[in-house]
Image (tube, rainbow, N blue to C red):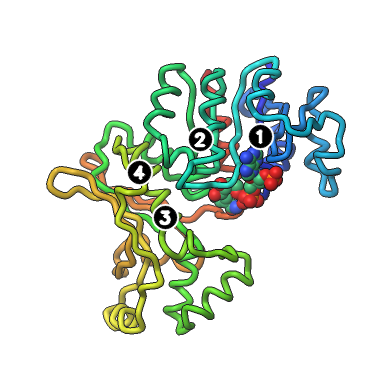
Amino acid sequence: MVIPLILTGFGNVGKAFVRLLAEKHEDCRSRYGLDFDLVAVVRKTGAWMANKEGEFFNLAAPAAEPLESRPGWFPGMSLSEVLVRARRRGALVECTSSNWQTGEPQLEFLHAALNLGWHVAAASKGGLIVDFKNLQAKARSKKLSLKFSGATAAALPTLDVATVSLAGAKILGFEGILTGTTNYILSRLEQGLSFEAALKEAQAKGIAEMDPSMDIDGWDTACKVILIANAAAGTDFTINDVNVEGIRVVTSGALADARASGNSLKLLGRLFEEGGRYRAEVKVMPVPPSHPLFRLTGTSKGIVFRTDTMGTVAVTDGKSDPRGTAAAVLKDVINIFRDR
Ligand SMILES: NC(=O)c1ccc[n+]([C@@H]2O[C@H](COP(=O)([O-])OP(=O)(O)OC[C@H]3O[C@@H](n4cnc5c(N)ncnc54)[C@H](OP(=O)(O)O)[C@@H]3O)[C@@H](O)[C@H]2O)c1
């Protein structure tokens, strides 16, 4: 049976997802018995709806015609209209821009999809930050999957490890390098570059955004800590529950101290217990050579979970770019349907 997918957001990740789906389509069929078809793509200005099965392959071509000039483009059409028009239910692939203050547009999109019986695989995080408990309750009450691996450090498996591999264990805490940009800049500071030079270099290489504040002030890491903690440890954190410090505070003195003691400075997103309660913070900390995250330099990421029964479990690396993120979303889509 063909499983319909609807994509919201047709930027770097959305386009990478379409290309990856075309590339892996046959593999999904032969390895998992899953025949996915992308039936619609929703942008800010309207939506494209396929007229026939497999038409999405045309969108994946390197010099593909813009969606707006194709047959099946409906200016002004919203996701809600697309969902109503879809003949069968499947999964929403949510790749719009993330706004962790309003949650939009993801918040509206996730509620709309879940209300109408669609599973969700998300790369964006705004709505999940603002309203996770309600979204999770809605998905559970309707026996739908709400997955967001791509939003929690791209291809680095964080949620799957915490919720599947560590099932039955209590997560006592975790600490992660969850943002490649900040780790890259810290690595370059340790190699002697000034903050301004390291940031400029990261921007020139496309590692840092032109407005880098979301990353360097720690908010991107904070969002990932919230998502992982809420999904894995059952907390109900919002952005106000995390003490957030970015990497602008790093002084030459702190760098010299770390170097002298053989440590490495990392921006860590942490969940820990204090006074019988979970707490979360984002903080630059010296990490000793014995720590599993010590060797992670440049844009590498990693996370270390501490549990009551399984000891310490570390996962590192995984691609951080749009293709790696799209691959994490495809993994979620496969896992939603493979056992149903
Ligand atoms: N880039 C990465 O490597 C990466 C890694 C992990 C997670 N993510 C997350 O993945 C998401 C997408 O990232 P990206 O790099 O693809 O961003 P992007 O290139 O800026 O694309 C964002 C897309 O969101 C769409 N959008 C915004 N508001 C919308 C609305 N109201 N209705 C429909 N579409 C709307 C935009 O539509 P238009 O095209 O119509 O303007 C655009 O296509 C972000 O939330 C990001 O945090 C990205």
The kind of residue tagged 1 is Leu
The kind of residue tagged 4 is Thr
Of circles 4 and 3, the one toward us is 4
Where disc 2 sits, the SS reads: helix
Where disc 1 sits, the SS reads: strand
* Among numbered discs 2 and 4, the one appearing first in the sequence: 2
Residue picked out by circle 1? 7
Local crowd size for mark 2, using a 10 Å CA cut-off: few (<14), some (14–19), many (≥20): many
Residue picked out by circle 2? 107
Of circles 2 and 3, the one toward us is 2
Local crowd size for mark 3, using a 10 Å CA cut-off: few (<14), some (14–19), many (≥20): many
Where disc 4 sits, the SS reads: loop
The kind of residue tagged 2 is Leu
Q: Residues under labels 2 and 3: Cα distance?
A: 20 Å
Would the CB of label 2 be found within 8 Å of ligand 1? no
**Residue 312 horizontal/vertical position (percent):** 28, 49
Residue at image position (43%, 72%) is 186
Q: Are marks 1 and 2 in contact (CB under 8 Å)?
A: no
Residue picked out by circle 3? 221
